[in-house]
Image (cartoon, grey):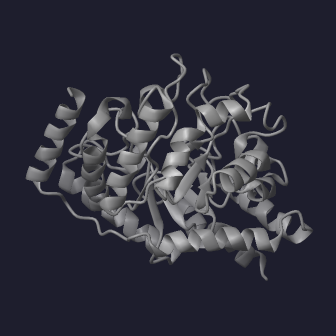
Amino acid sequence: MARSQQLNRFGHHLILGISSSTLSDDDKRALNELKPIGIIFFGKNFLDGTPYEVWLEKFKELNNQIRQYTERDSMFVTLDHEGGRVVRTPLPITRFPYALLLRSHAYEVAKATALELKSLGINLSWAPVADIFSHPNNPVIGPRAFGSTPETAAQGACDYYLGLRDSGIIGCAKHFPGHGDTSQDSHIELPILNLTLENLRLRELIPFKSLIEAQIPLIMTVHILFPKIDANVPATLSQAILKNILRKELGFQGVVVSDDLDMKAISNMFTQAGTIAQSFNAGCDLFIVSRNINSSSIERTYQIAEDFVDSLSNGSLDESVVEAARERIEKLLTITPQHSIQALDKDILLQHAQLAIASCYS
C-alpha cells in the first residue's frame, strides 16, 4: 500500500481542527491527504461580529469546502458546546448556563441546544461532562459538572445526554475516568491524581456507569496520571484504565476518543515515536487534534499520522487493533445524521433565551 494511502488510513481515526473561518493552504492539504473522518470547530471558525445571516452563510461555505476536500459525504461535525464558558458560536445562538445550574432543566436545555446545533450542521457535541465537581479549586471543571456528588452528576449528565440523543445529536461522556478532583488544568500541565481503583469505583466512575447503561456511544479520555492504577502513563495511553476498567469492568463497547492531543498534559508525548500505537493498544479509537492550542501546526498532525504508518509497518501496532477501532467508528458514523445548515426562526431563539434565563433561577 502506498504511503499516501497509509496516511489516509489515519484519517479514519482523526478529528481535525482547522485554522479560521476560511480554509488555508495547510487546511486544504490536510483535508485532502489525510481525509479526517471528523472536524472540530472553535470560535475562530465563525465570522464573529457580523449579522446572523452573514456568519451563518460563511460557515455554510466553510462546511461545503471541507466536504469537498475530504471527499466525504458522511463526517462527524463536532463542537464543544456545554454552556457556561464552553460555547464557541456567535449570537444569536443561545448562551445556556453552566451544567451545575441546570438541575431539573438538563433534558429540556439539551433538546433546545440540539436544535441549535443541528441548524449549524453539527451532529456531535462533546458533551455531557460526566466529571464530579468534587474539588473546590478545580481550575478546569468546576461548574461544568452537573453536580458535586456522584448521584447528582450522574442524573444531570444522563438527562442531558438523552436530550441530545432524542433530538438527533450524538453525545460524548467526558473525561474518563474523571477530571473533577484535580487542582491542575490538563490544558497546561499533566495533573496527577493519587486515587485508587476503589476510590474511582465509589465516586468518579458512577456517572460514567450510568451513561454507559443509557447506551452513550462515545467516551472521551482524560490526560491525567493515576499512579496508583498506572504509574507509567496518563489515562489516554493506559491499558489498565481504558481496557481493564472502561472496556472490561464497565462493559463499554462504543467509541473511545482521546481528549485533544495538543493539550500540554500530553502534547510532548505525541512527538515521540510509538505513542500513537501505545494509545491504540490501550483502547483509543479516535483522536482529536484541535490545532487550537498554541496554534499547533499542521506538521504536528502529519507527524502523528507518520508515526501511525511507521507503527503499522514495524509491527508495534497490529492491523487487528486498527481494524477493530475502525469498525467501531464506522458503526457510529452509520447512525450519525448529516444535518443541513439553515437559519433558525427568531421565535425559537426567543423561547430558548427564556429557557436559559429560567434555568438559572430554578
Q: Is residue 264 above or below residue 288?
A: above
Q: Is residue 351 visible?
A: yes
Q: Quadrant of residue 267?
A: top right
Viewed as shown, does residue 245 lie left or right of 90?
Answer: right
The one nearer the camera, 263 or 244, is: 244
The one nearer the camera, 55 or 122, is: 122
Q: Residue 7: where, in percent of width, then height?
A: 71, 70
Viewed as shown, does residue 181 lie left or right of 98?
Answer: right
Task: Please state the total of marks drawn on the protein image.
Answer: 0
Q: Is residue 86 above or below residue 297?
A: above
Residue occupying the far right of the picture = 314
In percent of the image, x 46 and y 40: which residue is there?
154
Quadrant location of the N terminus in the rendered image? bottom right
In percent of the image, x 88 and y 63: which residue is there?
316
Residue occupying the far top of the picture = 137
In percent of the image, x 73 and y 25: which residue is there?
194
